[in-house]
Image (cartoon, grey):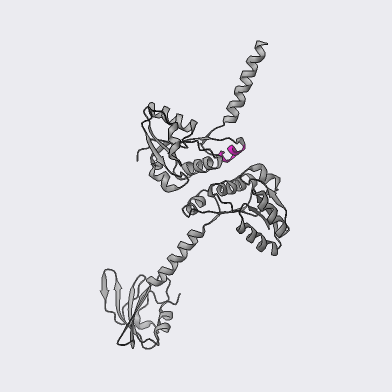
Amino acid sequence: MKRNKFIVIGSGRLGGNIATKMSEAGEDVIVIDATEDSFRKLQESFSGYQVVGDATDMTVLENAYIKQAKTVVLTTDSDNVNIFLAHVCYYIYNVPNIFVRLEDTDKGKLLEGTAIQAIYPFKLSFNEFIELSKEEGEDI
Amino acid sequence: MKIVIAGGKHEADFVIKALKEEHHHLIVINQDRAFAEYISTSNDVPVFPGDPTKGYCLSDAEAQGADVLLALGDSDTDNYITCITAKRLFNIKKTVAKVRNPKNVEIFKKLGVDSVISSTYLLAQTILNESSVEKILKTLSIEDEKIVMIELGVEADFNLVNKRIMDIQFPKNINISCIFRDPHVIIPNGSTIIKPDDKLIIISTPNEQEEIIEFIRKKK
């Protein structure tokens, strides 16, 4: 079976924009979200599929071609859901590329020993602050 | 035993009462402050108010190295995270998760939760077991209920499997009239050997019916 799907779970600001971007880049994108309204975050240029459903239900995941996923991006608003689904994708469906957004840096410990890659908005914001404050310091 | 009970409402209350009687060391964690207070006063145990999916909460509650953790929260996903955190980061030996979605039973087990409980799943298993009993037993009364015909499925662990009919000490008033061995229909004689998955059609009298069924279904 060919693994050619790019699946985004959680169509918020980040998920929606990643989905749009990858769709523009020619990827076969599928976006899953529990509420239909969330798909508003997708830009007009998005040409993939939208699936309404609870991704923690395996039937929903399988209907969204999880078995053919080469990449899964997890951007729901719950760290627990993101980690659970990352584990499901990694250990059960053997998805080769998994990215997960986590608010709580402590929870990253649950990804140790896997190839799952975490994105921490906290760290990014913090580092950005440090950078910006350095520039500020230089000005003075 | 050192047992952690994380989340849950009435099920937590019930489990705590039962375990307390057996004098286990209980660590109770509950995020719902009002309920935490209720459990604490009604069972006379300390309750840590906090989110058990967070490592620092398990750490504050001194859950490290516990024998068992029960995750009884309302969210399946949260219960999963609690169990996995307990297992990987707190060296808790056995984890048990309650789930609402019966499909999660197999998934959680594959992902490393030791034991997963779903009332719906248990219900389905019970129904399946009940219906398999139905499947191996059908009876039909003929001639004003003076004669009964019993259809009985043979399972691999029955005592009479792989024996010749002539070698089996049957109770009286029994006649195996026919054996259905898919796709064949066999009219048996003394040297016919009974195999697993055979369907026996037995003619008997209503009085002996129970004794015969018991005899056939005797395990090895």
The stretch in magenta equals A106-111
Q: Quadrant of residue A20?
A: top left
Q: Relative to residue A70, is residue B57 drawn left or right?
A: right
Seen in the picture, residue A68 relative to B161 is either above or below; the reply is above
Q: Relative to residue B84, is residue A14 drawn left or right?
A: left
Taking depth in this image into account, of A132 and A112 the one nearest to the observer is: A132
Q: Position of residue B156 (x, y in %)?
A: 40, 70
Taking depth in this image into account, of A32 and B189 the one nearest to the observer is: A32
Question: Which quadrant would the N terminus of chain A be assigned to in this image?
Answer: top left
Taking depth in this image into account, of A18 and B219 the one nearest to the observer is: A18
Q: Relative to residue B25, is residue A96 drawn left or right?
A: left
Residue A4 appears in view: no
Residue A138 lies in magenta, yes or no? no
Q: Residue at x 67, y 14 (%)?
A: A137
Q: Position of residue B209 (x, y in %)?
A: 39, 84
Question: Which quadrant would the C terminus of chain A be assigned to in this image?
Answer: top right
Residue A107 lies in magenta, yes or no? yes
Seen in the picture, residue B198 relative to A30 is either above or below; the reply is below
Q: Relative to residue A63, is residue B118 drawn left or right?
A: right
Seen in the picture, residue B193 relative to A88 is either above or below; the reply is below
Q: Quadrant of residue A121?
A: top right
Q: Residue at x 45, y 30 (%)?
A: A18
Q: Residue at x 45, y 47 (%)?
A: A57
Q: What main secondary structure does the magenta stretch of the protein show?
A: helix
Q: Position of residue A49 (x, y in %)?
A: 37, 36
Q: Position of residue B114 (x, y in %)?
A: 56, 54
Q: Quadrant of residue B98?
A: bottom right
Residue B134 appears in view: yes
